[in-house]
Image: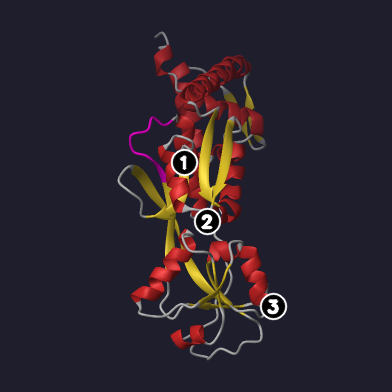
């Protein structure tokens, strides 16, 4: 009975090529992330379909029969063509190229985006990334709405004109000078009245969240220094000039000499991505978002917090 080419499976041909390369079923299975039994059943099914013996099996492994060598040559051509088909389709979908423009607040760009970009470059080297670091939430939102950026990395929540996804929660820390004594119970609200307070300027989203938190708990926040650059604020704490309240990602890296505490009532900010709801987004944008979501599940700076 004549062989029907439509019955041939690429998966079986891929198994044949793997066994031919490695010389035994076990190693072939490891290379394809399959069990040895699956490889054996696949080769048997291929031999049954073709009606010929492709491999001679012995105690020292498996070798191609003469007809097996001929068929392997055609199988390799078919596998190569299938890869070319996939590459062509990926290119047409934009996965092999394109540019993604990102607007982000600096702390996220500094601590979270680098591993995302490294993974993206490894998997999709044709996709290029452009990053604009912005200090204000409004500026990030505006960049996305105006089409200057494809993706915004910002605080959540945002308006209904965006499609969003939460990426991480970033706790606010209190940085205390090395020589300041703190109760074993941790910081209390009155401790903030005994030390100069260092905070980012008003209208900075990080600062606004802290000020609102103090208002909610009916606490006075008497700010002695409004410092835009977080590295300057952290250095001031290390020199004993006051205590700073900063989100973890903003504060990092924190010198070992600086004491780190939680607020009396813990506070965190939600960070996520936003794209225009009515935007026409390229496949490269969705590919970036997929990598971003995966990577941020594993990447966050860590520093022990005193209890």
Mark identifier at residue 103: none
Query: Considering the numbered disc 2 on the image, is that residue within a helix, a strand or a loop?
Result: loop
Q: Position of residue 77 (x, y in %)?
A: 58, 16
Q: Residue at x 50, y 46 (%)?
A: 292
Name the quadrant containing residue 6.
top left
Q: Between marks 3 and 1, how big is the CA–CA gap? A: 38 Å
Give the residue pinned by disc 2. Answer: 298
Name the quadrant containing residue 227.
bottom right
Mark identifier at residue 143: 1
Disc with the residue nearer the chain's start (1 vs 2): 1
The answer to whether residue 273 is seen in the rendering is yes
Q: Position of residue 64 (x, y in %)?
A: 63, 23
The magenta span reads 274-281
The answer to whether residue 254 is seen in the rendering is no
Q: Quadrant of the N terminus?
A: top left
Q: Name the dominant secondary structure of the magenta segment.
A: loop
**Left or right of residue 284, residue 22 in this image:** right
Query: Considering the numbered disc 1 on the image, is that residue within a helix, a strand or a loop?
Result: helix
Which residue extends farthest left? Answer: 160
Q: Please name whichever residue, 142 or 302, is drawn nearer the observer in this view of the structure.
A: 142
């Amino acid at each position: 009975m004549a062989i029907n080419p439509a019955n041939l499976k690429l998966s079986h041909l891929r198994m044949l090529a793997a066994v031919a390369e490695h010389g035994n079923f076990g190693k072939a299975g490891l290379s394809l992330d399959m069990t040895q039994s699956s490889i054996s059943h696949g080769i048997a099914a291929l031999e049954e379909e073709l009606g010929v013996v492709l491999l001679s099996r012995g105690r020292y492994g498996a070798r191609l029969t003469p007809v097996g060598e001929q068929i392997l040559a055609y199988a390799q051509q078919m596998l190569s063509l299938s890869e070319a088909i996939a590459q062509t389709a990926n290119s047409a979908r934009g996965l092999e190229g394109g540019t993604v423009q990102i607007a982000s607040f600096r702390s996220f760009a500094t601590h979270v985006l680098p591993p995302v970009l490294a993974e993206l470059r490894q998997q999709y080297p044709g996709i290029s990334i452009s990053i604009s670091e912005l200090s204000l939430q409004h500026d990030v939102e505006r960049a996305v709405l105006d089409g200057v950026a494809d993706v915004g990395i910002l605080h959540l929540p945002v308006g209904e004109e965006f499609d969003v996804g939460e990426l991480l929660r970033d706790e606010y820390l209190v940085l205390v000078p090395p020589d300041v004594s703190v109760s074993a119970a941790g910081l209390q609200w009155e401790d903030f009245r005994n030390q100069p307070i260092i905070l980012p300027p008003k209208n900075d989203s990080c600062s606004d969240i802290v000020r609102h938190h103090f208002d909610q708990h009916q606490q006075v926040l008497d700010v002695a220094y409004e410092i835009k650059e977080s590295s300057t604020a952290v250095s001031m704490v290390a020199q004993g000039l006051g205590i700073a309240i900063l989100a973890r990602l903003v504060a990092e890296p924190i010198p070992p000499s600086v004491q780190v505490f939680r607020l009396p009532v813990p506070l965190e900010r939600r960070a996520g991505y936003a794209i225009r709801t009515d935007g026409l987004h390229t496949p490269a944008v969705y590919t970036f978002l997929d990598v971003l979501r995966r990577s941020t599940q594993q990447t966050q700076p860590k520093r022990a917090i005193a209890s």
